[in-house]
Image: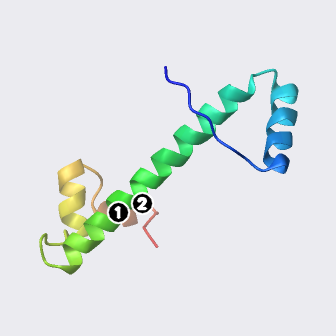
Amino acid sequence: MRTITVRVPDEVAERLARLARATGHPKSHHVRAALDEYLAELEDIVIAQQRDEELRTGKVEPLSLEEVEQHFGTASSKERTRRGYALL
């Protein structure tokens, strides 16, 4: 595991210290968890932006809901409606 150093505003450092005391976990635990969550979210955003660009430029074709359902083996639109639920 690598060590990195970051500078944070005093208020953020104080919040982190309070959280560490309240949970009994070290500050590094919370920083790692927050950074991991943030990076995962940001990676998802980057992938979505790349896919959007591919769609807008015609590099890929969009899939219909039925094609997605068929690919993932989920209930069809008619089946969802029959069961009393549907996407809005």
Q: Position of residue 53 (x, y in %)?
A: 25, 73
Q: In the image, is 22 to the left or to the right of 42?
A: right
Q: CA distance from mark 1 to mark 2?
A: 5 Å
Q: Position of residue 52 (x, y in %)?
A: 29, 71
Q: Of the residues shown, which amino acid type is indicated by label 2?
A: Ile
Task: Indicate the secondary structure of the residue bearing disc 1.
Answer: helix
The quarter of the displayed image where residue 13 is located: top right
- Mark 1 closeness class: few <14, some 14–19, many ≥20 residues within 10 Å: few
**Is 16 located above or below residue 2 in the figure?**
below
**Residue at figure coordinates x 81%, y 21% from the top left:** 24
**Is 15 located above or below residue 68 in the figure?**
above
Instruction: State if disc 2 and disc 1 touch (CB < 8 Å).
Output: yes
Residue 9 visible? The answer is yes
Where does label 1 land, which residue? 48
The quarter of the displayed image where residue 32 is located: top right
Q: Position of residue 66 (x, y in %)?
A: 21, 65
The quarter of the displayed image where residue 21 is located: top right
Q: Nearer the viewer, residue 55 or 35?
A: 35
Residue 45, which numbered label?
Answer: 2
Q: How many marks?
A: 2
Q: Nearer the viewer, residue 35 or 5?
A: 5
